[in-house]
Amino acid sequence: MPLPTATLSVSSSSSSLSFFPRSSYSSSKKPQLGFCPTRLAKFTSVTEPKYPIRKLMTISAVSIEKETVISERPHTFLRETDGEDDGSVRSRFQQMIMEVQDSLCGALAALDGEGKFKEDAWTRPGGGGGISRVLQDGAVFEKAGVNVSVVYGVMPPEAYRAAKAAASDQKAGSIPFFAAGISSVLHPKNPFAPTLHFNYRYFETDAPKDAPGAPRQWWFGGGTDLTPSYIFEEDVKHFHSIQKKACDKFDPSFYPRFKKWCDDYFYIKHRGERRGLGGIFFDDLNDYDQEMLLSFATECANSVVHAYIPILEKRKDTPFNDHHKAWQQLRRGRYVEFNLVYDRGTTFGLKTGGRIESILVSLPLTARWEYDHKPEEGSEEWKLLDACINPKEWI
């Protein structure tokens, strides 16, 4: 008997992604999402909306100018009014993320040995731009993406809510903003080599258009987290010890606070489990000295190579079989679910009309979903799932 099938309609316009819910549909001639097992008496279809939802969504998301691809990366993406190297936080944060991108890509390419990074650079007419570097189908990496971006734009209210963690901190009207960040997701081929994600960003918002003269706001956000398919405790302890070391240089309360924040943030609510084995995560951080937080974000970003490369060197050539690979693909499916449903960075990018290839570079090349899959209790797969359901203190 053939398996039940489902198709998903993804509509792209102005670099936005649309998922149409059932409640948005009444009736039409063209099914978009259907699920039809063999003995189903009646076929229920999900159909096109009577109203132009895609156009309405696009109007609310037009807040960043369309990018223009350029042949060579510029020295800076800052507007002339910001100054190219004036010592501002904007300038120094941009310099930091570009240096981290260079050093990390160099380390990853050297480790892979075969794959090479493809680079795309772009700018926007009103200022800002970015650089995406992606290595695909290498000897070690299935997909490794390292992006930097500097963005000027105007956030609609729903994008501001996506960018800010505090639900009570909501502003009316559109808000001019500046954002700069580095984001990376590294998916190795070997099931015993973990996926790594990190992101460090700096935001500033100007006064809303309907409240001129209001004070400018700023905050830092970011984190580094590990997502293995199989647990090697020595690897996880090494990874967490590097995060703690970076945190302890600035405040001994940071690691326990940001470790718990990471466990809570990367929670897949509809599965009742975490995406991986955590690390650190923080957002809306502005209750410390700005210079201290800039140094903290820099320290965390620079620690990525030390936290991850030694683990890869040990695990990249570990023998594996089809069973191990299938489990890795199932865990990759969880990765996709979290990123598309819950991740605020992805949500913010989609709501502000960001560059779609950069936003979705975090997704793996391949993933897998099996109906009602449950690992055997006591198995290595079960141990990983148990740790995702019940977070541990690794150090």
Image (spheres, rainbow, N blue to C red):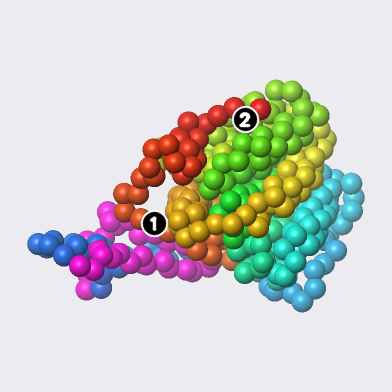
Residue 186 at what x, y percent from top left? 64, 56
Amino acid identity at mark 2 = Trp
The stretch of residues the image draws in magenta is 1-29
- The mark nearer the N terminus, 2 or 1, is 1
Residue tagged 2: 394
In the structure shown, which secondary structural element does the residue marked by tag 2 occupy?
A: loop
Quarter of the picture holding the N terminus:
bottom left
Q: In front here: 309 or 363?
A: 309
Extreme residue toward the bottom, this view: 71
Relative placement, left or right, of 193 versus 14 is right
Quarter of the picture holding the C terminus:
top right
Dot 2 surroundings within 10 Å: few (below 14), some, or many (20 or more)? Answer: some
Q: Residue at x 59, y 57 (%)?
A: 319
Q: In front here: 165 or 257?
A: 257
Count up the numbered dots.
Answer: 2
* Residue 155 seen: no
Residue tagged 1: 369
Q: Is residue 23 above or below residue 233?
A: below
Amino acid identity at mark 1 = Trp
The majority secondary structure of the magenta stretch comes to loop
